[in-house]
Image: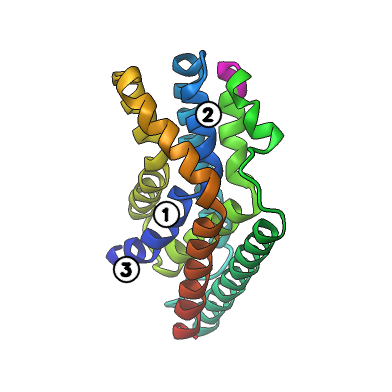
Amino acid sequence: MLQAIGHILPIALAVAISSVPIMATIVILLSPKGTKTALPFLIGWVLGIAVIVTLCTLSAQAIPAPRSDRRAATAIAVAAILVGIALVVVAIVEWRRGRRHPSDALPKWLASVDKLGPWSAFGIAFALNVRPKGLLLAIAAGLAIRAANLSVGQSAIVIAIYTVIGALTVAVPVIMSLVDRKGTEPRLLESKEWLAHNSVAVTSLIVLVIGVVIIGAGIANL
């Protein structure tokens, strides 16, 4: 199980630093309805992470146990390499798109999240987990859990750790804002400005590195 935790930690970190849910959280918290919609948004984000990675882990069960068949271990490794390559491609595309169309303005849909109601905020947060990058990261985590050939209980623990780490960057500002809205607001404004300038470059770099790490791990397991 420790090996599986070690493999999913960098993947969960990539989920955590994804700029879109962080920016959406900040926009919601700075809105007049922030206290009403921030918590549903957090719940949707957490449940989305847990559900998607669980589904990916269950889907990976279609690959036979690696201890019983060397071909199965190879299949898992090849699948991980393909996911890693896809992540590298996504990172490069996002970076090039950001370079080609630099802008500090928020996308229209993101700029409007401050007008969402609680249920809409929940749905948007859940849906953010099925973006290509988020889905690829969940698949990579599911493959890592499957490769370790864990029991149901052990898999649940690893998934819980993955979910907690992935949700931290949304959970922390929400909790801080609920505890001390006025004191947190200046930090949120600073974070919003910084993310508007740097989010594409930072996120693309991290996803690129994680993709390379996943490719390397897959090659090592061939």
Give the number of the mark in front: 2 or 1: 2
Q: Magenta span covers which residues? A: 116-120
Q: Position of residue 150 (x, y in %)?
A: 37, 61
Q: With respect to residue 220, does 211 lie above or below? A: above
Q: Position of residue 148 (x, y in %)?
A: 39, 68
- Residue lying at 55% horizontally and 17% vertically, measured from the top left: 118
Q: Amino acid at mark 3?
A: Gln
Q: Position of residue 33 (x, y in %)?
A: 51, 14
Measure the C-alpha gap from mark 1 to mark 3. 14 Å
Q: Amino acid at mark 2?
A: Val
Q: Residues within 10 Å of mark 2 (few under 14, many from 20)?
A: many
Give the number of the mark in front: 1 or 3: 1
Is residue 22 visible to the viewer in this orientation of the structure?
A: no
Choose the circle earlier in sequence order: 2 or 1: 1
Query: Residue beneath label 3, please?
Result: 3
Query: Residue beneath label 1, please?
Result: 12
Choose the circle earlier in sequence order: 2 or 3: 3
Q: With respect to residue 158, does 37 lie above or below? A: above
Query: Residue beneath label 2, please?
Result: 27
- Residue lying at 66% horizontally and 60% vertically, measured from the top left: 99
Is residue 174 visible to the viewer in this orientation of the structure?
A: yes
Q: Position of residue 13 (x, y in %)?
A: 40, 55
Q: Amino acid at mark 1?
A: Ala
> CB of mark 1 within 8 Å of CB of mark 3?
no
